[in-house]
Amino acid sequence: MNESKSITEWNASNGQNSEFRDFHKKDVVDLGKVAEFSLRSLFEKTNTDKRKQQQQLSEVEKQIDNLDKMRHTPSKVKGEDLPFDLKSKSVVFSMKTLIEKGRTKYLEEQRIEQPPTKTLEESKQQKQKYLLNVLKWYPAETNAKTASDIQVTSVDSDEGQDQPNISTCAAAPTATVSPRKETRSRRYSILKRLQNNKPYEKSRMKTPSEGMLQHRSETYSLFSKCKLLSNRTHGQEDFKEKRQFSQSKVESAQTDRESLRMRPICAQGSSMQRYLKLSYDQHRLITEKYDPGFIDTHCHLDFLFNKCNHIGTYAKYQSMCNGQDAFPVSYEGCVANFCQPWTFKRISWWENFLAESNVWAAFGCHPHYASSFGDEEEGYLRHALQHAKTLALGEIGLDYSSKNNHSRELQQIVFRRQLKIALEFNKPLVIHCRDADEDCINILKEIVPRDYVIHRHCFTGNWKEAEKWLSTFCNLYLGITALVTYPYTERGCNVQDVVSQMPLNRLLLETDAPYFRPHCYQRPGRWSHPGMAIHVAAQVASLREKSVQEILSFTRQNTKKVYGV
């Protein structure tokens, strides 16, 4: 029974499959017919498109042929007389008309243009007419004298020169221009001349010989000399006096140049002249041992390593510096500033710097990076301030110079925010202020007490600005960089004046490395390092007429008061 059922089921299923196959065959046949029809229609469409394109091309060619025929015909055909279809159908027509207009104008101007000899003759005639009009106002007796004097002066002025002399109006120079150079100078753009609407003679480029002749005619011609006579003098004696006066001026200018060479560069009593008189032995600063030594209170080790492509520890970099760049024997350490907010989160990176025994740190957002300081950066900043070797918060402040693209409002918000953080952690401040003294002092007055410890970093102002900072905050210290060693700059002279007047118990030495390389080590492509702060001490000592050891003792005590090291 089971076998019979399976057989019947198989037959039924086989019958169904046969019906499905027949139906499937019909569908395939219908699809083939549809595909054939679609292919035929596509082929016909492509053929029709090609025919249309060929027809359009043939029409354009006919239009161009018609234009060529019209151009060769003697009758003049204007653009207005042409049919509207020819104007609007193709861009070729418009370009053809522009070029034809340029050619016709160029040919007409070539016919009208005169040779260079005729133009020179016309200029001679104009000069002679002007001379006659000018000499009418002079007496008859002085006419010959003035003319002879003019000839003599023109010959004297041309002596010692390789160019040909121009003595009289009648003997004007002839243009000796090679035809090859002349054809080169006549090349010009048709469309550019159509826009300017200037004649060909004015728009074309002059040859070197023509330019030389024009320059000589403007400077040494009789025309210019007679013009001077008519405008300024009314006789021969006045002209001679003027000439003697001009010669005396030339002689006085020569004597002034000689005196300037022998004269000192700076005025007496200025800080620039005092610097030029001072000198110190830079090699002795490196080899001599001073007790106490010095600490660079502000530098950027991360910027320095990027400048010199150094990969490794700070001790390795210190050992690599030799010769002029060698670290002095009395160098004791540096305070590295990390002022880019995105580096606060790289904890292991900046901890490697602080692993050195003579490196301390200060963290803060520089005003150039105010837009990068947010809640996340503030959290990492608070974490960095908890490190044992983090001595201050900075550099922070305001920068209104053209180097900073951030708005003043944003800088002030970030500045206030960081001042409150510094008060929470009781950390000294490292202030960066450029062209914003008033706003910076006012914000500090609002938030920070007057006796708060502040390091005014890289001071470059004058004595009035320094006195304002020192009088406003009693525990404020001015950081002086190697800019004090620059004698020929305005900022260097200002810093020298400040150093010569400020109290030494408010002075800090810094390099702001890799910037402000000392003047005695100026070389292109070089940079400074924390060991070069001793040059600042030597320059201050020479300005204050004291020894380097005395200056180092003052600055070492000041660093202990501010940073505690």
Image (cartoon, rainbow, N blue to C red):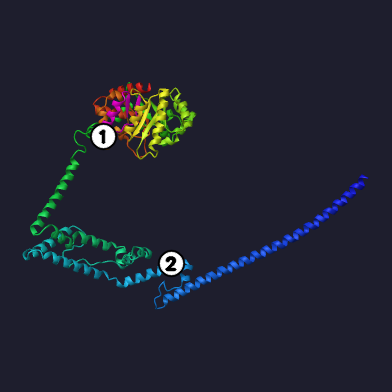
Residue at the far left: name it: 141
Q: Could you say where residue 56 lies in the image, as x and y percent from the top left?
A: 53, 69
Residue type beneath disc 2:
Met
Q: Quadrant of residue 117?
A: bottom left
User: Is 472 inside the magenta-drawn segment?
Assistant: yes
Q: Which mark is residue 95?
A: 2
| Magenta span contains residue 320 | no
Which residue appears at 60% of the width and 68% of the height?
48
Foreground label between 1 and 2: 2
Q: Quadrant of residue 219?
A: bottom left
The span from disc 1 to disc 2 (Cα, nearest Å) is 66 Å
For residue 106, side relative to residue 134 (left or right):
right
Which element is circle 2 on?
helix
Of residue 494 and residue 281, the one placed in the foreground of this image is 494
Please say whether residue 270 is visible from this viewpoint: yes
Residue type highlighted by circle 1: Cys
**Residue 277: x %, y % from top left:** 22, 32
What stretch of residues is rendered in magenta? 453-479
How crowded is the residue under tag 1: few (<14 C-alpha within 10 Å), some, or many (20+)? many
Of residues 158 and 37, which is closer to you in this image?
Answer: 37
Residue 390 in the image, given as x and y percentages of width and height: 42, 25
Query: Which residue position is annotated with label 1?
Result: 493
Specify the label residue 300 is tagged with.
none
Q: Residue at x 24, y 71 (%)?
A: 118
**Count the marks: how many?**
2
